[in-house]
Image (cartoon, coloured by chain):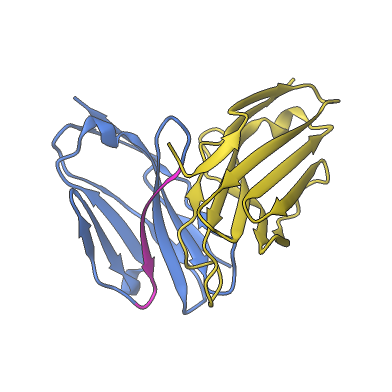
Chain colours: A blue, B yellow
Amino acid sequence: AQKVTQAQTEISVVEKEDVTLDCVYETRDTTYYLFWYKQPPSGELVFLIRRNSFDEQNEISGRYSWNFQKSTSSFNFTITASQVVDSAVYFCALITYNNNDMRFGAGTRLTVKP
Amino acid sequence: DTEVTQTPKHLVMGMTNKKSLKCEQHMGHRAMYWYKQKAKKPPELMFVYSYEKLSINESVPSRFSPECPNSSLLNLHLHALQPEDSALYLCASSQVLGTGASNQPQHFGDGTRLSIL
């Protein structure tokens, strides 16, 4: 069985603050893939990043960075210098090699205030 | 604008109606998905099609009937729905490479907001 936990239900920050969204996952499979998606109020889920279980390198894309640590089964997402446009619900998701059933965490609602 | 197009964007229907949700993608993806998302909840997988064949049906009630007429289109036929079926229905697609679709990012449409009266 696989499970994704996003313990932070809601986070509120002021613009320009840094914010980290936590994601902890569980799976018995050795090959798996982790994703982060952003869901603005419009409803569309926007793909942000994919990381496979064999690649623990951290990644930075502009103001976004991701920290993947297999030892703690975590895949955390940091937004640096947050902006109002970052306000959305962010989902962490897990899918295993032989299964097309992607499991989402409960989501973290981020509000960035001006 | 997304590369996965869903119509209609909003749908209100009675419990005795029959309607269909449509999804279209032109990215050459051979895996397509239907998800159901209730308010303040994550998306839940309903169906997966791979090469136009149903590969996953997550114990969805028969009042939801998927159809994949070709590699670009995915429909969800609705009949005799219940008020608890009111939700956002999301369609997604992804590539299918040699090792399967699971490692490929899914691209989502804007969804259809369905209300059952």
User: Magenta residues: mostly which secondary structure?
Assistant: strand
| Position of residue A79 measured from the top left corner of the image (x, y, whole percent) | 22, 47
Q: Quadrant of residue A90?
A: top left
Looking at the image, residue A99 lies above or below residue B92: below
Q: Which residues are magenta?
A: A45-54
Q: Is residue B16 left or right of residue B39?
A: right
Total residue callouts: 0
Residue B53, image x and y in percent? 73, 62
Against B48, is A86 above or below?
above
Give the residue drawn at x 58%, y 74%.
Answer: A98
**In front here: A54 or A4?**
A54
**Residue at image point 72% right, 52% down:** B68
Picture layout, residue A96 above or below residue B61: below
Q: Nearer the viewer, residue A23 or B36?
A: B36
State the residue at coordinates (66%, 39%). Answer: B22
Q: Quadrant of the N terminus of chain A?
A: bottom right
Quadrant containing the C terminus of chain A is top left
The answer to whether residue B38 is visible is: no
Magenta span includes B75: no
Residue A34 locus on image (x, y percent): 41, 63
Does residue B52 appear left or right of residue B107 in this picture? Answer: right
Residue A66 visible in the shown view: yes
Q: Residue at x 40, y 49 (%)?
A: A37
From the viewer's perspective, is residue B109 above or below residue A6? Answer: above
